[in-house]
Image (cartoon, rainbow, N blue to C red):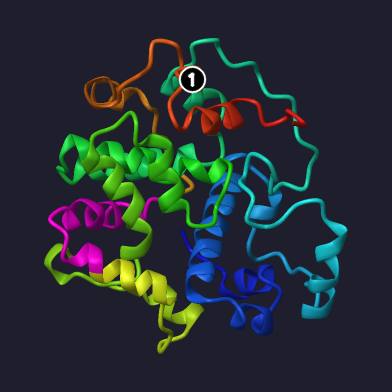
Amino acid sequence: MKIDQKKFIDSLGGPEAASRMDSEARADALESHMMAELNRAKTGDPAWDQTKPKNYPTVAEVEAQIETRKYREGVGFMYVPRTGENVRKLPPMPSNATLFDFFKLRFMDTSNHVLQSANLAMKNGMSEEIILACLLHDVVQEIIRTDHGWWGAQLFEPYVPEKVSFAIRYHQTLRYYPDPSVGYEYPDLYRQLFGADYVPPPYIEATYQMVRKHPRYMDARLVTVNDLYAFDPNAVVSIEPFTDIIGRHFKQPKEGLGNDGSPVAHMWRTIARPDQPL
């Protein structure tokens, strides 16, 4: 996917607003921007035409809009659609909803990307656990985008092997740090957008130092290898090729996700019922 640098910077409120964001916030914004652009291309949104000239607001105008909104930008795609249209009524979830049901009925804005990522991991001969981690690594962005690696690991931790949850949690951190041993280079796009001399926030640097020494480091690293380039607007990937992998490594509760009393059941209920006022 080609990124229109000016369009992305303008979406943040212009160069001045972007300069006030730390590198982690800008990276999260970039990934969200790429997902939104991918979904707009998939649905035939005419706004996908990146050559069409647009009138962008000034930094002051963007900041003035903050108090006119009823949401924060860190909220997930399910709660704040990026199409500018009204939300639509979602189909009801089955009473004993499975992971497949959530992919079909709730993970609409993130599924294309993660399916591409998992497909790439499969083509690259990754282990089944890494393929599963790629399949799940970003779907939590349906409800929240900030620190999505940590949120995503928490969402899946009761149901997947430790290797999978570790990889999901720390892929977010490792995308900033190259590793020639697996062919992962720091993306030139990040240099263009964030500056060649930027330094990640202290908590990201500290997390990287910890993960780099961890026995499971490579599990998280391999998600980054199969993540960054899984934004092909022309790719069509279904979940069916991953059915057996999910069956072997995802512990589907018989009561249904959200009804099993796990420490994260409330997160699944939140995704299932995003229109509940309380």
Assess whether residue 218 is covered by the magenta stretch. Answer: yes
Residue underneath mark 1: 101
Q: How many marks?
A: 1
- Which residue is nearer to you in this view: 41 or 130? 130
Q: Residue at x 18, y 46 (%)?
A: 124
Q: Is residue 273 above or below residue 93?
A: below
Left/right placement of residue 171 relative to residue 58 reads left
Q: Position of residue 269 (x, y in %)?
A: 57, 26
Q: Residue at x 70, y 45 (%)?
A: 80
Indicate the quadrant containing the C terminus: top left, top right, bottom left or bottom right: top right
Res. 237 image quadrant: top left
Q: Is residue 86 above or below residue 21?
A: above
Q: Residue at x 63, y 63 (%)?
A: 50
Residue 41, can we see it?
yes
Name the kind of residue labelled 1 in the image: Asp
Q: Residue at x 48, y 57 (%)?
A: 147
Res. 106 image quadrant: top right
Bounds of the magenta span?
210-232
Q: Position of residue 15 (x, y in %)?
A: 65, 83
User: Considering the numbered disc 1 on the image, is that residue within a helix, a strand or a loop?
Assistant: helix
Assess whether residue 250 is covered by the magenta stretch. Answer: no
